[in-house]
Amino acid sequence: MTDSQLRTSPLHTAHRDLGATFAPFGGWEMPIQYSGGGVVAEHTAVREAVGVFDVSHLGKALVAGPGAAEFVNSCLTNDLRKIGAGQAQYTLCCVESGGVVDDLIAYLVSDDEVFLIPNAANTAEVCRMLSVAAPEGVTVTEQHTDYGVLAVQGPKSSELLEALGLPTKLDYMAFADAEWEGRTVRVCRTGYTGEHGFELVPRWDDAPAVWAALLDAAAPLGGRACGLGARDTLRTEMGYPLHGQDLSLEITPVQAGSGWAVGWKKDSFWGHEALRAEKANGPVRKLFGLRALERGVPRAHMDVLDAAGERIGESTSGTFSPTLKIGVALALLDTSADVKIGDEVTLDVRGRSLRCEVVKPPFVRTNVK
């Protein structure tokens, strides 16, 4: 895909004015970092104060009609019956083999309405699969460019939203629709950073005004605009999976440690037979965290070696942790290698050995609640 074919968010001009560095991501041209700080400064702002992200590239879809929630629950892995209206749930869209088409958030509006936020590159396929399976009377409408998504993350996120008069007294994974200067904004207690935070869903054309107000109010709090570079370092520190790397059509929820997002007691969902069998038999590989014991920066697709130098797996994500000041990674390791937490392994970083300790993510403390 050429640069001219990349889609842009409703805030593209605002990002350019802030000196953003852009890069392709999921078919969109999105800001990776901004001038005047860069990824580390943006990452630190989220951990210590508040950061504001434009993630409008994320997909949006509406499933509506009689029994829409029951229908969605029969397709996606998690159990919507565990939550009520006004709550959101992390879930997975799988295929018959158990591979993951996408991980997404489902917002339960009512028994007859579910709002979905999939990943950018997978929105069309998720909508297609749901549309094909939908019973008469249930419609699936892609709304990718009907709404923007702005993430407000960090210990001062509530203070920032209160400055705009938006609701903050929400339980984790709950949402509410609010009015801001005559505009409707859905406020969700969700995020992808491991910090206390919110995700705002305004109308597409309203996103620039909400963004500008957030940045104006963030500055006195030590907050700033943050790009997808910091979003990646933040989520990696938490061990949150990125679809296409840590979850994919080849990497199942059982392998990726995402079985908690599967409603095992449900009668059925897409991929249930394969996933139940894999859970019962045990996966052939399993996702672990790796914490570097010396200087070096892990990246994806690096071989993991045991003490004898034998390959036992591969890293799926890796970065330098601005919080810990060391390298961290996620890696799929063969269960036949019988690796345990606390073991030492070696990561092949472009021909150089990097000693790592096997750990259980997250690498830093979570503060989402």
Image (tube, rainbow, N blue to C red):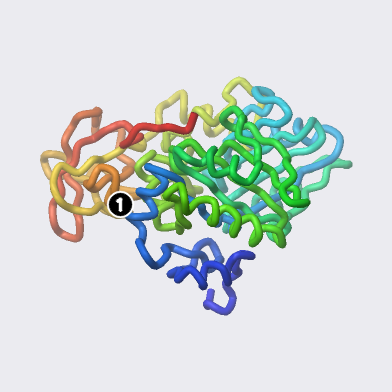
Graded by Cα atoms within 10 Å as few (under 14), some (14 to 19) or many (20 or more), the crowding at tag 1 reads many
Residue 178: x %, y % from top left: 72, 41
Q: Which residue is situated farthest in the front direction here?
A: 220
| Relative vertical location of residue 295 with respect to residue 290 in this rendering, above or below | below
Residue 139, position as x, y percentages in the image: 82, 46
Tell me which residue sits at (52%, 67%) in the image: 15
Residue depicted at x 56% and y 41%: 198
Question: Residue at position x 23%, y 47% from top?
Answer: 325
Q: Kindly indicate the quadrant of the structure image that contains residue 165.
A: top right
Residue 93: x percent and y percent?
A: 60, 42
Residue 115 makes an appearance in the image: yes
Q: Is residue 98 visible?
A: no
Number of disc labels: 1
Along the viewing direction, whichever of 174 and 155 lies nearer the viewer: 155
**Going 36% across and 37% down the picture, which residue do you hit?**
287
Amino acid type, callout 1? Thr
Residue 5 x %, y %: 59, 76
